[in-house]
Amino acid sequence: MKFIVHKLLIKSKEKELVNISFEINDSFALVGQSGSGKSLTLKALLNMLPSNLTCEKNIESDFELIAGENISIVPQNPFTALSPLTKIGTQFMLEEKRAGEFMKMVDLDEGFLARYPSELSGGQLQRVIIAMALSRDPKLLLLDEPTTALDSETKDGILELIVSLQKKIGYKVLFVTHDVEATKALCKEIAVLKDGIIIESGGVSEVLTTPKNAYTKQLIASNFKNRGKRE
């Protein structure tokens, strides 16, 4: 299943904001600090850029880029992705038995379908969002900092779940994050984004172990330093 971004150019009236190309062979991480262009890249793939920006895309793929069908997204904050006034089961927009099957895939029982989002923990809600994303049978799963608000143990569980489900289902992964360490558990390839341009890319192990660019070295060092403080 092919997915190659030959060109993704996002511009405002004043300047270029993103100008990149990449290929997702299996699981691909796009890392960078806030303002590097990660979120704009996701919005462009979902055709959700604001009207004041223009976008040129040249994408070679075996499937159409249709959000909600071939592409699903797992957002950073599951609380904002769900209606707090509606039970989980209703928000699936599937019949209950089918929704229950997807809940089991993410290690939650059918009883959660009768609950409201406020009755679930952050980790449980993220599992619900993953189940909903997979219910659309995506060919490409976009992950927008999906573990940022989670504690270390819960985060590791979510990453392991995504890897396990990918092996079973076969979707491709684009993981957008500033958490360099998390990419080791989830992705095989990585690209470092700075000011809308990819400055270094390659295998995750290679880039994280022997980074060539000074910015990449700084990003990795900062990430592990902050991680140590949190733990």
Image (cartoon, grey):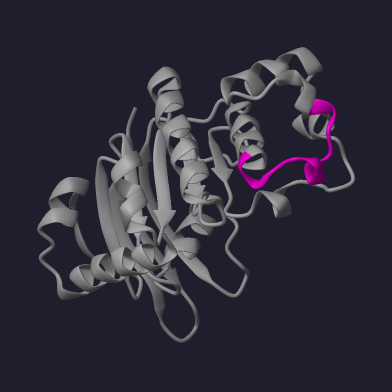
Q: Which residue is drawn at 75% across and 19% down?
A: 110
Q: In this view, does 163 lie to the left or right of 66?
A: left
Report the residue that reaches farthest toward the bottom: 14
Which residue is more in the foreground, 188 or 67? Answer: 188
In percent of width and height, residue 138 lies at 53, 30
Residue 125, can we see it? yes
Compare residues 103 and 193 and report the one nearer the observer.
Answer: 103
The region drawn magenta spans: 113-123
Q: Residue at x 75, y 30 (%)?
A: 92
Q: In which quarter of the image is the C terminus?
A: bottom left
**x%, y% of residue 57?**
41, 55
Task: Specify whether 47 is left or right of 110.
Answer: left
Quarter of the rendering containing residue 126: top right
Q: Is residue 33 located in the magenta-colored stretch of the structure? A: no
Q: Residue at x 65, y 47 (%)?
A: 122
Residue in the picture at 58% in, 50% down? 75
**In the displayed structure, would residue 112 be above or below residue 154?**
above
